[in-house]
Image: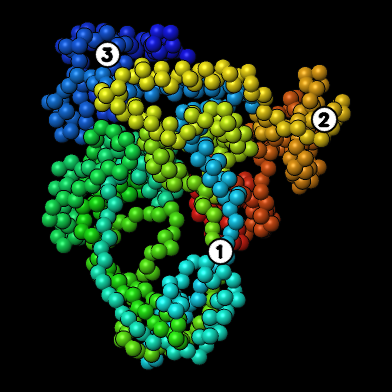
Amino acid sequence: MGIDIEKNFEPEYVIPKDAQKRVTALKKLATKASSVILATDEDREGEAIAWHLEQALDLPDEKIERIVFHEITKTAIEEAIKHPRKIDGKLVDAQQARRILDRLVGYELSPFLWKKVRRGLSAGRVQSVALRLIVEREREIKKFKAQEYWTVEAKLKKSEDDDNQAFIAKLHSVDGKALQKFDLGAQKDADQIVKALKKSEFQVTDIRQKEARRFPAAPFTTSTLQQEAARKLGLSAKQTMMFAQQLYETGYITYMRTDSVNLADQALVQAQKVIAQKFGKEYGLAAPRRYKTKSKGAQEAHEAIRPSDLEKHPEEIEGTLEPRQARLYDLIWKRTLASQMAEAVFDQTAVDIQAGEKYMFRANGQVVKFEGFIKVYTEGRDEKDEEELPEGQLPKLEKDEILKALNLGGMQHFTEPPPRYSDASLVKALEEYGIGRPSTYAPTISTILERGYVEKVEKKFQPTEIGLVVNDLLVENFPKIVDYEFTAKMEADLDDIAEGKLKWQPVIKEFYDPFKSNLEEKQKSVTKQVEQTNIPCPICGKPMVKKFGRFGQFLACTDFPNCKGTKPLPEDEAQQKKLQDDAGDKTCPECGQGKMMVRRGKFGYFLGCSRYPECKHIEKIEKKTGVTCPTCNEGELVEKRTRKGKTFWGCSRYPKCEYATWKYPGKEEKKEEE
């Protein structure tokens, strides 16, 4: 494990064999140098790397010059060299404490899962809490019962206007009492009102107009960049961080691991210059707009993510970047600029319309009076806001004016379950709960996907069967490890270590002692996770149990190891039979002797030669669409994936016919997956 628990959790660091030559060479160079500049990243991890270099190279304290910069530009680096400092031991301690905590949980708890569920599983201080979020959301969705409700809408117009100038007004109150969401719970309730209003006049009783302002979002932090890149560019958290790292390393943006929403003074000045040149002075600000960090436990006073040079417009550098890098740069450039632009101004109108004696309808309209920042950028959203005013202008109406009703009717609605987490909303939830750090979100999400605990269905996370079992086992037996508040408190303790308010060893001891004691007790008391069935073993006839294997669940004999009888689950058996029927009686094209049989592997079903292992020929099972190829008119269009996982549809006769399309054949275009 590399941690000496008896020596107050002292970590044991070893230089890997493949790095020893490099370290020896660096040592020689350092001996000859009058000073050694350590310019690792400016966060806690970077500080820890600088400290490791100091230790590995045996550097005397007086030789070390630690410099930090948040953009790789000549000016920033020259300025950093002018202001060297010593390595910050408090930041090193905080990072070391995080690594030790994560290792203690992972190295001690993962073997427990191997023994009680199956090998190859893992648990983690942050990943297990992220899994819990997804599992609990899935169960909320499963328990959710849709509730019906109705609204009544009138399509109205001024008597002299054309029908295409009509607008919608919604029933707002009855007998002076505001209508609540579920007051009209069935069609009969809406029909009753519609019937009562058939011969009623619609008269304007009140017109209210006001000016509203919308302010831009703050510049990007790591978390908000990951969220917005998921919403607007379809990038996963991992992809976002990879492309951001590349943009940082090539000098296009500032450091991409940050909690800060502040911009440097020179960036604020440059923003106003670019805004005035590109859009006009009226779109700028007289004084810079400052933002406050909202995230729990925001770390050191870094700068927000911004372009290193705002005068490098996206269209000017597009050709020098890979397409997705360019799109991410464009997003960062626009968000940064928008944060320092004038607010958008809207004219909002609300009109109350009396119908009959007791029914009052309301129509709302909103038009842009001054675009301000929305000329450049508007923030994406995970879900539609029902309270948001509709965009559009109402006709000029007068009080007491009689309107003509073109249509009147009830509209049926159903409440919807909470949505499954997307990349954006999961990152947002992790940040709101104070779980992990922005730099850990991407690897955390990648881990629970790679372990098979969750899968992405239509870009939303769903727990798998193994994910549900692992989560429930941890929640029941190690509630603290997956507790949201406990995990957030641990992050706060790490922040306090970084600020010198706490020592790292007592924090770890306070966590580890009860954790280890509980783990030892659970090793004895928790039995292997299996589910009993009434299905008889095909070999000995004894009952079988559901177990987890490398490729999912299967049935195994209860008399194992005396009897090694296994078989697929009934539902898997049925699916396998259907796939085999679809594949037909196909001879192996490689050996010409075996038959192509449906098999199951890590990534699902595939066709393999029946003579395996003598013949190792395999083929993908392609999803058929029933649509004939429009190019050759012989093959059928089948679903395929690129190496990067993008879905497309191509001819089944490939490579003889190379027709391919991103559009789903015969239906509406499916969005291209990143």
In the displayed structure image, the side of residue 503 where residue 157 appears, left or right: right
Packing grade of label 3 (10 A; few <14, some 14-19, many >=20) is some
Q: What percent of the width, then of the height, locates residue 207?
A: 31, 79
Real-space Cα distance between discs 2 and 1? Answer: 45 Å
The amino acid marked with disc number 1 is Phe
Q: Which mark is residue 414?
A: 1
The residue where tag 2 is placed is 543
Task: Measuring from the top left, give residue 496's x and y in whole percent.
Answer: 30, 27
Numbered badge on residue 535? none
User: Which mark is nearer the camera, 2 or 3?
Assistant: 2
> Could you say which quadrant of the image residue 277 lies in?
bottom left
Q: Position of residue 222 (x, y in %)?
A: 34, 39
Name which residue type carries label 2.
Pro
Number of the label disc, if any, that sits on residue 54:
3
Task: Relative to 26, say whether 428 is above or below.
Answer: below
Q: Residue at x 53, y 27 (%)?
A: 478
